[in-house]
Each structure stands twice: as C-alpha cells, then as structure tokens.
Amino acid sequence: MDTVTTIDDLRARLDAVRAGGGSVGFVPTMGYLHEGHVELMRAAVRDCDHVVVSIFVNPLQFAAHEDLEDYPRDLRADSRQSADAGVATLFVPSGEEMYPVEPLTEVTVASITEEMEGRFRPTHFAGVATVVTKLFSIVGPCRAYFGEKDFQQLALVRRLVLDLSMPVEVVGCPTVREADGLAMSSRNVYLDADQRAAAPVLRRALLEGAARISAGERDADEIRRVMTAVIAEEPLGQLDYVEVADPLTLAPLEVCDTSARLLGCVRFGTTRLLDNVAAADGDGESR
Ligand code: AMP
C-alpha cells in the first residue's frame, strides 16, 4: 500500500489504473479507523481492482464549537489496518492541499438534510456534500462505499449522485457493532466507563420501536413515544431526537410500516452517538 498526500500524485496513479482497464473503489473516512471502516474496505476490495481510502478530517463539516481540533487521530494504526484489508492507496491530504483557498462553492442537498442531524448541526451536511463532491472529482471512483451507520449521510450521497449524474455507484454497507450492540464509532473513545456501559440504550430503544412496528403498530407518534421512554430510563443519556422516517427521503412519517427507518441520537456528556435500524429488524432476528 502507498500513502499519497497530493491530489496530483493521486490522479496520476489512478489515471494509470484506469488506463490499464482497472476499476477504482473508494472509501472516504475521517480516520481513527475501526472494524466498521474495515468492513467498507473489505467490500471495496472484493468488488474493485484498486481501492483508495481517504483520511481527511474535513473542517467544512464541523461547526466552530464542535470537536474538529480534538477529533481522534492515529495514522500509524490506520495505515496498518488499511494495508491489512488490501487497500492499494491511502490518500491523506492536508487541509492546505484540499482547501488552498477558502472555497466559494458549496454543495447542498435539500430536504433529506433538513430534519434530525440537520436540525442539530445546521451547517454539517453542506460540508459533507461539498467534500464528497470534491473527493469524487479527485478520485473518480467506479464505486464508493458508505456505512448505514450514518444513514442520513448515505441518503444524501445517493441523492447527490442521482441529481448530478455522477458516474459512481454508491454502495451502502451494514452497521458494524460492538458485542453489546453499540454501533462502532471513532467518537466512542470519548465515552467514560459509565457512559460506555450506558450507550447501548439507543439501539435498545430503536429495536423496541421496530418491534412495535413488526407487531402491527402503525402510529409513528406512538413509536416515537416508546423509543423516547426507553431512553428516558437511562439518566446518563440526553435525547437529541428519535425519528420514524421514510427510508429514502428521510421525511418523518405519521403512519408507518415495516419499510420505515428508525433513527436516533443520544448525547452522553458532549458526545453525540447516532444509530438507526430498519423497522423490519423488529422481527427479532437481529436482536
Ligand atoms: P467517518 O470516519 O466517521 O467519517 O466514517 C467513514 C465511513 O465509515 C462512513 O461511510 C461511515 O458511515 C462509515 N462507518 C462509520 N462507522 C461505521 C460502522 N460502525 N459500521 C459501518 N460503517 C461505519
């Protein structure tokens, strides 16, 4: 595996791959990699001839009060995991390389980004859409791999690619979890021992909502109440939101069925943990 830090070097390498008929797969990340990221890489390595992983903590998607400076970093461990997964190129640009001038161009995806994370982080998704567009234009992948863990982000990327006819197939990959059900996240490292022990409450709440839908409940407000009540039992967690949404548009539902997506965010101290499940997961198989 080679590590590349400039856009020109990366383009030259990938042009050569494409000229030889090879397909390029791409996994964008912010580093501090865990098994969730590694699963994306494995999927990409299975499907594509040459896999690129980017590690870039994108300042555009952090608000001034957020954890940009503190975001965990460990390039040595990231390199080892990427190489072990069969990644061909690690792209690690500096902030200067990505944004040599203050960008005047911003990509926004309406509607999908308005609820949930969009309410709590109003500038976040424009930062994501802009950097994903930029990374796609740098890498030129045939396929790009994103986790269902960040379900609203995955929906945004799918819509971005559709709306702008980008020549890339977006592949969504299932959420990888710890043994107790907590979704893996680079930010889990911020949790103290008590918060870590309490953190699976979000998944339990989502699965309880899903179970009610599987059992026949169709009133989405009732499902929100059930999920809120589960989280209220955990004093260390503060609810940001729980939602019952359309799986493609992410519009909040009034009436739901087993095609719905259940999403939530709970804060433990200053750490915001996201998770989501399919309503169909309420049939007990994945519990
Ligand atoms: P991040 O480094 O947090 O920006 O995440 C990079 C990619 O990894 C995104 O597509 C995430 O959705 C995905 N990802 C993060 N955590 C997980 C997980 N636990 N399971 C599956 N994918 C994940």
Image (spheres, helix red, strand yellow):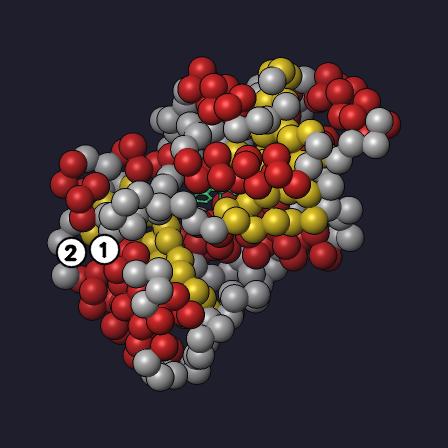
Percent x, y for residue 93?
Answer: 60, 21
For disc 1, the marked residue is: 201
Dot 2 amino acid type: Glu
Question: Between residues 84 and 272, which one lies in front from this camera angle?
Answer: 84
Rendering quarter of residue 277: bottom left
Residue 272 visible in rendering: no
Q: Position of residue 15 (x, y in %)?
A: 81, 25
Crowdedness near tag 2: few (<14), some (14–19) or many (≥20) residues, C-alpha within 10 Å: some
Asked where in the image residue 136 lies, by quadrant, the reply is: top right
Report the residue marked by disc 2: 234
Q: Quadrant of the C terminus?
A: bottom left
Nearer the observer: mark 2 or 1; the answer is 1
Q: Quadrant of residue 270?
A: top left
Say whether residue 59 is left or right of residue 96.
left
The secondary element bearing badge 1 is classed as helix
Q: Mark 1 and mark 2 in contact (Cβ < 8 Å)?
A: yes
Disc on res. 285: none
Residue at left 27%, top 68%? 208
